[in-house]
Each structure stands twice: as C-alpha cells, then as structure tokens.
Amino acid sequence: MAIRDDFEVAAGQVRLVLQRFALTILVVLAFAAMLIGKADTVLVENARVLALDLASPALEAIARPVAVANRTIADLKEFASLREENARLREENARLQTWQTAARRLENENTRLRDLAQFREGPEASFITARIVGDSVSAYVRGALLNVGRQAGVAPGQAVVTGEGLAGRIAEVGEHSARVLFVTDVNSRLPVQIERTRERAILAGDNSGLMRLTLAQTLQGVQRGDRIVTSGHGGSFPVGIPVGEVVQADGGSVKVRPFADFSRLEFVRVVDYGVTGLVGSGAGPTVPAASPKGR
Amino acid sequence: MRADGVLAMLDRWGRLLTPGTVLLLFVLLTFAPLRVPYVADLLPLLPALAVFQFSLATPERLPGPLLLVMGVLLDLLLGGPGGPVGVSALGFVLIRAAVIDNRRYLVGVPFLFQWIGFCLLILGYVFLVWIFTAIWTWTDLDATPAFAQYVVAVVAYPVIGPLLARVRPRDPLNVPEASRGTAQPGETTP
C-alpha cells in the first residue's frame, strides 16, 4: 500500500515537472528534429518519402474537386473572350500549317541524311503520364507532388515535361508518389545550351518566375528571344527539351522565362530515359528486331 | 437513455477530435493545387491560423505533442531539399504558448484585439520560418512571397477565424484548468 502511494506521489511529481517544463521540452524536441534533419539527411529523405506515400491518397482525393473548380473558373474566364480566342486560334492554325509543311520536309531530309551518315541516336525515351496531386509551393519551395512512383518506373533525376517544355526534375520517389522540383526552384541547377549559338550554360532558379543563366562563357552573344534547351549533360535528361526563352539580356545578367506555365499544370509527363537501353535510330531498317523497346 | 448515451459520447468525441482533425486537413490542404490567385497564397498559413484559433478557443484539445507531430508532418511534406524539418512544429508550439500566456488580452475582448494578436503572432511565425530556412539552406532567401502570404492571411482571418471554432468572448475562468493560463478572477471584462 505504501509502495503504491509512493509511486503515485512520484508519478504526480513527474507529471508536475512535465507540465512546468512542457514548453521547454517541446521547443527542445523541435530543435532536435531540425538538427537530426541536418545531420542525417538519409533518414529525413526516407521520412519524407514515407510521409508522401501516406498522404498521397488523401491529396489525390483533394486534387480532383480542386481540379474541377480550377477548370470551372478557367472556363468562365474563357467564355468572356471566346470570339477573340477563336480568331486568334484560326490565325495561329494557318501559321502552324506552314510550319508543319516545313517540318515534314526537314524531317524527311534529316532521316535521309542520318541514313547516309549511319548516325546512331541516343537512348529512346518513354513517357509516364502523371497527375499533379499537390502543389509543393510554399514561400521557399517550387515543386509539385505526382501520383506515380517507383512502381510506375519513376526514378530520381528524371525529367518532367509538359506540352510546352521542361517543368523540372524528380527529386524524391515513393512507392506511389513522387516529388517534382520545378526549374524555377532555388535549388534547381540545369545544364542547358542556347539553341541558336549551341553555347553551354547553367540555368539556375531563384524561386521567382524567371531563371538566371549562369556560367556561360560569353553572355554577350545572348539575345532577347533566344530559346534555351537542355544540353543533356549530367544524367538522365534528353537533349533539346525546350526550357525557356531569354526575356532580358543586359550586361552580366540574363533572365529566362520558362515555357511551362506552372500556374495551370494538371498533367505532366515523366521522361523515362536510359532505362530503355540503347536502341537504334528509330524507324530505320537497320534496327535489330529484338531491340527491347521499353513499354 | 441508451441513445442519449451514444449521442453524448459522439458529441464528446467529436468535440475532442475536431481541432486535431481540422489541423490535419489544413496541413494536407496546403498542397491542394489550387490556381486561384490570392486563395492559393492563403493555403500555406492555414495550419498556423488553425493553431492560433483553436489555442484561443480550446487549447486543451490541441496538446503540444500533437502540434509537434503536425508541424513535422507539414515540414516533411512541404520542405524542399535541405529545408529544416521541425521549424513549423516550433512555430506551432510557440504560437500555442503565446496565446495561452496572453489569454487575458485575447479572450473576452473586442474582435479587433484578437485580430491584432493574430497579426503579431503570425508575423513572428513567418519570420521564424524565413530565418530558419535561410540559415539552414544558407541562401539569401527572398522574403517577398512569404510576406505576400502573410498579408493574405491577415486579410482572410476575419472570414475564416470565426468559422473554425465558436470563439465567443468567454470568461477565461469558465474554461478547463489547463487552458486558463495566467488569468486571475476578476481580470476580464464583465
């Protein structure tokens, strides 16, 4: 009986101490979490992936009604300018028709020249289409969460593209989810080249809408309107994915506006490049029949 | 009698679980790919808003350890590479402590005072997250988007705050012991 009383007294004292120092303990725990995160990045990475996988069904459930709402709002906006939009599209269509003719002619010519030169292209890319289930956009991060993961063949470092151009790269992969880091994120460094001059450079994000072109040997040759494409250096990025357009080039700083419109992304494609293995030059008759084309 | 008992139990559990559930929902809602301008800016500060509001109304149902877990979850989900995991948790815990310590200025007073309290505390929270993220990633972070979010949250508070909980001007002594804070009898407005 006495032991029990002693125990209760001790427990009461412990509870009192805990209550008195509750705030201190919680603050210390929060700091400990931050320090652990700094010290053991692998652990945090695993925790992030786990959290991502656990939250992704809920996020997907939220994403669908949100997408419907977004679309409704966009539709309402478009109603207002339907007539102008139609006229603009008709004009654009006419212009694109001419381009298509030119592109067909060039493609034919290209194929013939490649045959002649026995040119072997790099690995052929396959695509994984994904829905964006979450915006990982806080004040300090530019990214998104996708509903595909390792099971669909997604791996860290793969390129993520939209219809317009490169959106970013895969940063973390869970079983059924993945995190994209947009090219505009402050952590993004992308090896690119200037399409006109073929000069290589690094494109760095800074969390704003524009990106900075750095490490180019001569920035003088860069003009406004120059297209920036991926150079394919350093990893699993294909060559020549359009990234953006130079909007400002004066003196030392060159600013690039991304082609991808991050404010209306709903579906993206993850470029699975390199897993497919080396395949011959597309439609040419020299391709061995047994070539494993990833599908 | 029996139905009464079940209903009473549901009621009790509902009250008990509401703040935590709403906070979890807001943490997840932070990622909703909403493209509406201004509204999308509000989302990242919604969890902090919920912590403030529930700490005001029913702090005993939003205990510190739960805030710690929610904050870490938010950081894990939201954080970019290299960002600090746990800074939101620290912010949540500090908001709760600050609200409880200053209940006498925040409860039973005109709504304007509550709003001012919210402005100050959330400004502290935004600054805390900014400075820690800047130190952790060792970059010169642009604080403009964070400030834009702050302004939107401050403007939206009068709309969302009262919806979250029935925050009536209550006498602090009419609440459970744990959430009474430093308030003394006779301190509040009648």
Image (cartoon, helix red, strand yellow):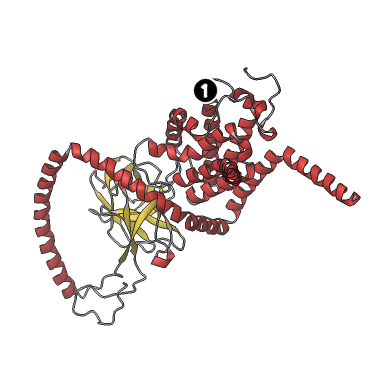
Residue B129 coordinates in the image, percent (x, y):
53, 39
Looking at the picture, does residue A56 appear above or below residue B113?
below
Q: In the image, A266: left or right of B3?
A: left
Is residue A169 visible in this depiction of the protein? yes
Residue at the image position 52 percent from the left and 24 percent from the top: B116
Chain under disc 1? B
Residue B109 horizontal/vertical position (percent): 57, 21
- Location of mark 1 (residue): B111
- Where, by quadrant of the figure, is residue A270 drawn? bottom left
Report the quarter where the N terminus of chain B lies. Answer: top right
Q: Viewer-proximal residue, A247 or A168?
A: A168
Residue found 80% across the figure and 43% down from its top: A12
Using the image as rendered, state which of residue A141 and residue B167 is in the foreground. B167
Residue plotted at (29% across, 61% down): A239
Picture quarter with the C terminus of chain B: top right
Crowd band around label 1 with a 10 angstrom C-alpha radius: few (<14), some (14–19), many (20+): some
Where is residue A56 shown, x and y percent of the image? 45, 55
The one of B60 and B146 positioned closer to us in this rendering: B60
